Image (spheres, helix red, strand yellow):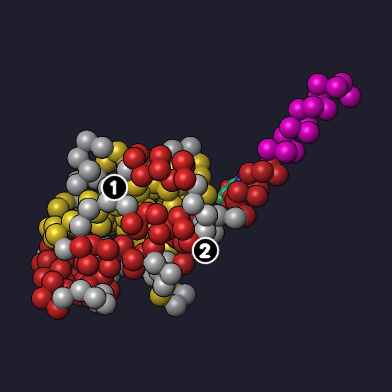
Amino acid sequence: MEFSQFVVIILVAIVSYLLGLKNGSNGGGSESAGFMVDKATGVQFPTTKKFISSKKNELSCVGVGTRKKAVLNIYSLGLFVSSLLEKQILKENPQGNALCKTIQSSNAQKAIELSFVMNLGPEKIAEAVSQIDGVKEDIKTEFHDMIVDGLGGGKIKKGENMTFEWKGSEITVTARGKLIGKMNDKALASGVLDLYLGSKSVSPSLLQNLGCK
Ligand SMILES: *[C@@H]1O[C@H](CO)[C@@H](O)[C@H](O)[C@H]1NC(C)=O
Ligand SMILES: *[C@@H]1O[C@H](CO)[C@@H](O)[C@H](O)[C@H]1NC(C)=O
């Protein structure tokens, strides 16, 4: 064997080993060209995406996960952050839980896209995201009703999406690519984000994929 062939074999081995390590440590997510894939469902999230509230700014996908109930997969979710926040993360390189804390405490734009893999009724969806400690009752009710009304009484079907989008203390909700509404309440906005990025996340696989856990 020529020396150059030998070098190529060694390089291929090293790269495969490193890729393998990455695969093994990212908790159900994997990256392929232009997408981050939730392996549990096969849902592909684009690495960058414009959201209704981000207007012309693209946000970057930094983590994916699954929302499960018992053994059922309900939806896949992708967390997107602004390039400003992404730069801050790369610079500060917070480890473990500190990463999720950095994202949670930032005022920069963020979004979570839910991509449903089973049908779910509007009441179930609204209840799940409005039962938040530390938020005023009337605010919770308003948020709940905004989602139920916005979904038009119909189930979210397999293959349909919703988003929660954050900008400072403002939270925007969309479904099926259309704006449902927005509310400006600090406790509500951070409470909904905490459902996903807090230590009791409804998607432990998202925390694992981000490396927060
Ligand atoms: C990583 O996981 C993906 C999805 O299962 C797979 O297609 C890919 O080949 C894996 N990469 C490596 C290097 O094992
Ligand atoms: C829902 O979101 C997923 C993940 O970003 C995407 O692959 C899919 O095309 C979206 N579906 C619709 C109907 O927009």
Q: Which residue is most to the front?
A: 92
Residue 57: quarter of image? top left
Secondary structure type for disc 2 = loop
Look at the image and tell me whether residue 99 can be seen: yes
Density class for disc 2 (Cα within 10 Å; few <14, some 14-19, many ≥20) is some
In the rendered image, residue 33, in percent from the top left (x then y), is placed at 48, 37
Residue 166: quarter of image? bottom left
Secondary structure type for disc 1 = loop
Q: Which mark is residue 108?
A: 1
Q: Amino acid at mark 2?
A: Lys
| Residue depicted at 27% across the width and 63% down the height | 190
| Residue depicted at 81% across the width and 24% down the height | 5
Task: Name above or below for residue 24 compared with residue 194.
Answer: above
Q: Which residue is mark 2?
A: 213
Density class for disc 1 (Cα within 10 Å; few <14, some 14-19, many ≥20) is some
Mark nearer the N terminus (1 vs 2): 1
Please give left or right for residue 42 compared with residue 26 in the image: left
In the rendered image, residue 189, in percent from the top left (x then y), is placed at 23, 62
Please give left or right for residue 75 compared with residue 171 in the image: right
Which segment is the magenta one? 1-15
| Residue depicted at 18% across the width and 56% down the height | 170
Look at the image and tell me whether residue 46 can be seen: no
In the rendered image, residue 127, in percent from the top left (x then y), is placed at 23, 75
Q: Which mark is residue 42?
A: none
Mark 1 touches mark 2? (CB < 8 Å)? no
